[in-house]
Image (cartoon, rainbow, N blue to C red):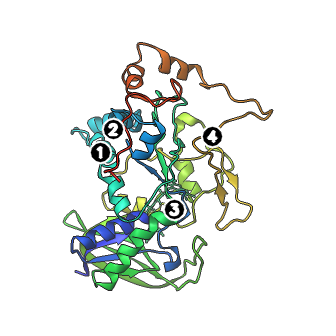
Amino acid sequence: MDADVIVVGAGLAGLVATAELADAGRKVLLLDQEPESNLGGQAFWSFGGLFLVDSPEQRRMGACADSAPTLALQGLGSGKRARVSTAASTTRGRKDFWPAVATAYVDFAAGEKRAWLHGMGVRWFPVVGWAERGGHLADGHGNSVPRFHVTWGTGPAVVAPFERRVREAVANGLVELRFRHRVDGLSVTGGIVDGVRGAVLEPSTAARGVASSRTEAGTFELHAQAVVVTSGGIGANLDLIRASWPQRLGPAPATMISGVPEHVDGRMLGIAETAGARLVNRDRMWHYTEGIRNWDPIWARHGIRILAGPSSLWFDANGRRFPRPTSQASTRSARSPRSPRAATTTPGSCSPRRSSRRSSRCRAPSRTRT
Ligand SMILES: Cc1cc2nc3c(=O)[nH]c(=O)nc-3n(C[C@H](O)[C@H](O)[C@H](O)COP(=O)(O)OP(=O)(O)OC[C@H]3O[C@@H](n4cnc5c(N)ncnc54)[C@H](O)[C@@H]3O)c2cc1C
């Protein structure tokens, strides 16, 4: 064995996994195809907007709800839960476990997440954004109240504490970083993934976010008790995006720009599937319709999004504001007394649509949960 655990991908997910494993005393090999300049992956470029539920920042704004975790779960799960549940029950004949994942995540976001990050020095802008509003109205799908907590210092400030922890673990001999190690396959013994193999890429001085060379200088094979794949998404792989495009949206756009560096290539999805992973929700993608080309691109087709706080106003080409809600369907689902979603979510929410005053349901800002 070369380590207790091999982590594939040194983006934020890989850094978090590695830091937590090292804290638990495990020896970790953290591999990445990119040079060290790219440590932290996409998160460095991100706005650092974090999903928190029932936070002191929300309570100060009156954007809370006493049943916030329930509402957050309904927003997260709408549509998705039903689809996964159906797929699981018809194809696997076993109990669907994805709602449990969503529940655990919302519990985390309503519980220890903020204190955990705060303890590492992460702080947030006091105005909570509503970037992921979802179905136009507070009681449609998506977030029922603002939950986008923008980190002071944006993405780099989210990466920093985990990079610090990982580098401390390197200094303590628990973690080894291996850059320019591109994983091309997972080794499986007796049905269990017990290692990785791939190509060592030639050294690169490419700056953060800039595409690096793919020239191979050697090969490697490594083994561990467990392999964690944290290789990011598919955002820079337009072929994969087109192949996975949701049919219900019609044809994929002929022209797309890309909000992510080229290392977000999605290759590990196919590699993991070959090793026996079951991929779900391939057509669930996060695209922004209001992306624009970066005038000073760092990567190919570099697109950016200008984010208004707490959320955007939308106008047509003549400067007229789009009507709200934008469709009859939204109106019906939001207002019909027969709609179970409208009936269950509205009473517990602090929708600014109903009142701009602090709701009597909102508690005072907590001094203890920081
Ligand atoms: C501009 C921008 C703004 C964003 N804003 C927000 C925001 O405000 N809030 C939010 O929640 N999210 C935001 N996101 C999304 C968020 O940053 C990403 O979802 C998250 O950082 C992904 O982290 P990751 O570790 O899963 O993947 P990545 O950061 O993509 O890291 C994966 C790593 O795996 C490596 N890798 C891939 N394949 C292999 C292989 N075969 N072998 C070896 N290494 C491999 C890659 O080189 C990479 O370093 C934003 C993203 C961008 C780009």
Report the Cα–Cα distance between label 1 and label 4: 28 Å
Q: Amino acid at mark 2?
A: Pro
Q: Is residue 246 left or right of residue 6?
A: right
Q: Judging from the image, what secondary structure is the residue with disc 2 in?
A: helix
| Mark 3: amino acid | Gly
Disc 1 under 8 Å from ligand 1? The reply is no
- Identify residue for label 3: 155
Asked whether disc 1 touches disc 2, contact meaning CB atoms under 8 Å apart, the reply is yes
Q: Work out whether residue 294 can be spotted.
A: yes
- Residue 264 in view in this figure: no
Q: Is residue 320 above or below residue 161?
A: above
**What amino acid is labelled 4 in the image?**
Ser
**How much space separates mark 1 and mark 2, taking CA atoms?**
7 Å
Residue carrying label 2: 69
Q: Any mark on residue 107, and which?
A: 1
Where the N terminus falls, by quadrant?
A: bottom left
Q: Is mark 3 within 8 Å of ligand 1?
A: yes
Q: Check if mark 4's residue and mark 2's residue have beta carbons within 8 Å.
A: no
Q: How far apart in space, not on screen, are marks 3 and 2 (Cα)?
A: 25 Å
Residue at left offset 54%, top offset 56%: 47
x 29%, y 42%: residue = 103
- Residue 95 or residue 353, whichever sits in front: 353
Residue 331 percent across, percent down from the top left: 54, 19
Total marks shown come to 4
Residue that mark 4 sits on: 312
Q: Is residue 188 above or below residue 131?
A: below
Which of the 4 image quarters holds residue 250? top right
- Is the Cβ of the residue at disc 1 closer than 8 Å to that at disc 3? no
Mark found first going from the N terminus, 1 or 4: 1
